[in-house]
Amino acid sequence: MAVVLVGNDPGSEIYVRNKVKACADLGILSEKLTPPSTISTGELLGVIEALNRRSDIDGILVQMPLPPQVDSRRVLEAVSAEKDADGFHPTNVGHLVANRPAPRACTPAGIMEMLRRYEIPIAGRHAVIVGRSDIVGKPMALLLLHANATVTICHSKTADLPGECRRADILVAAMGRAAFVTRDFIAPGAVVIDVGMNRVTGRDEVEQIWRGDPGKLATLEKKGSVLVGDVNPLDMVELAFAYTPVPGGVGPLTIAMLMTNTVALAERRMAVAAA
Ligand code: NAP
């Protein structure tokens, strides 16, 4: 696995550290490449091309976001579809649409794995996804559709968002809005998957979200921010049949599925080489 981390974004550094650690825990060789933030699109394409040619590398991951001068789309498309550990390459997105084997976007794939392991029924259920990004919302909708859910995709132009969400047996919130989804959005007994990762820094907001919980206010004092998902955590606990907490819910599974994708890519390349 090669991980390309451009520049020094602190959030990206933490994500990459966790991915490199997961590789080490599993005995997967990983190599971290750290080009400077001044790199041009052409230079970065050269880095990717060199990794595409290396026979000891099965998976390539380019940590997003890239600096503004770099054409992110060109870089992501330059990663060979056969080494696309993130499942973002258009060829692999096409395989997802056609429900054929290929690396899947890691966060939605992790959510499917979680639903499967907790034996949450999907077929015939109504799944509502809030968010239509290429990395979460759209692939999530396709995976749930392939598992025979009836799927509704909501976004910022959806009329009556709370009403749409209340119809969900399975509600997936992936919008990037702190604790936006409150009790008005959640049907009692729904399964609620909270993908959001937001940092709240205002004391009033922390007080309001956690109803004055002194522990959360102490965290704010100590760290300067408190992590919260897209769903109000207390409303979710009170109303949902099952839910994913933030942190500790969806996040760790994203890395686990990245490892799964990498192993599958390695096995596929070995099978092709042996054929
Ligand atoms: P994104 O690309 O910013 O997309 C956000 C989506 O939410 C868009 O489709 C947007 O609608 C929709 N949206 C935003 N505000 C809305 C509103 N008020 N009402 C209805 N829809 C609204 O975000 P993303 O990359 O999908 O990420 C979403 C969240 O998940 C973020 O908090 C991110 O940090 C988190 N995340 C977590 C993991 C993990 O491993 N746990 C992985 C990936 C992402 P439009 O399309 O109409 O603009």
Image: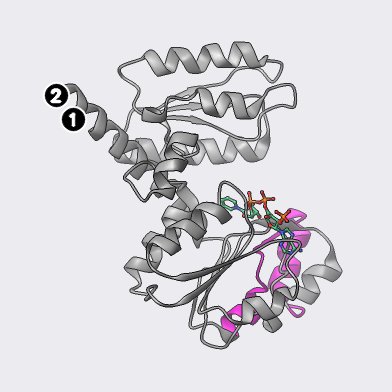
Please report the bounds of the magenta region as a residue range. 211-238
Name the residue carrying label 1. Answer: 271
Is any part of residue 117 visible from this angle?
A: yes
Q: Position of residue 211 (x, y in %)?
A: 75, 80
Residue 228 in magenta?
Answer: yes
Choose between 73 and 213: the one closer to the eye: 73
Ligand 1 quarter of the rendering: bottom right
User: Which quadrant of the rendered structure holds the C terminus?
Assistant: top left
Residue 75 placement, left or right of 111? right
Q: Residue at x 39, y 48 (%)?
A: 98
Badges 2 and 1: C-beta atoms under 8 Å apart?
yes
The part of the image, by quadrant, that contains residue 118 is bottom left
Q: Position of residue 185 (x, y in %)?
A: 67, 79
Q: Residue at x 33, y 46 (%)?
A: 100
**What's under tag 1, amino acid-wise?**
Ala
Q: Position of residue 18 (x, y in %)?
A: 49, 41
Residue 61 placement, left or right of 269? right
Circle 2 packing at 10 Å, graded few (<14), some (14-19), many (20+), is few
Name the residue carrying label 2. Answer: 274
**What's under tag 2, amino acid-wise?**
Ala
Q: Secondary structure at mark 2?
A: helix
Q: Is residue 206 above or below residue 271?
A: below
Measured Cα–Cα span from mark 2 to mark 1: 5 Å
Q: Is residue 25 above or below residue 122?
A: above
Q: Residue at x 47, y 46 (%)?
A: 105
Choose between 225 and 70: the one closer to the eye: 70
Q: Which mark is residue 20?
A: none
User: Which quadrant of the rendered structure holds the N terminus?
Assistant: top left
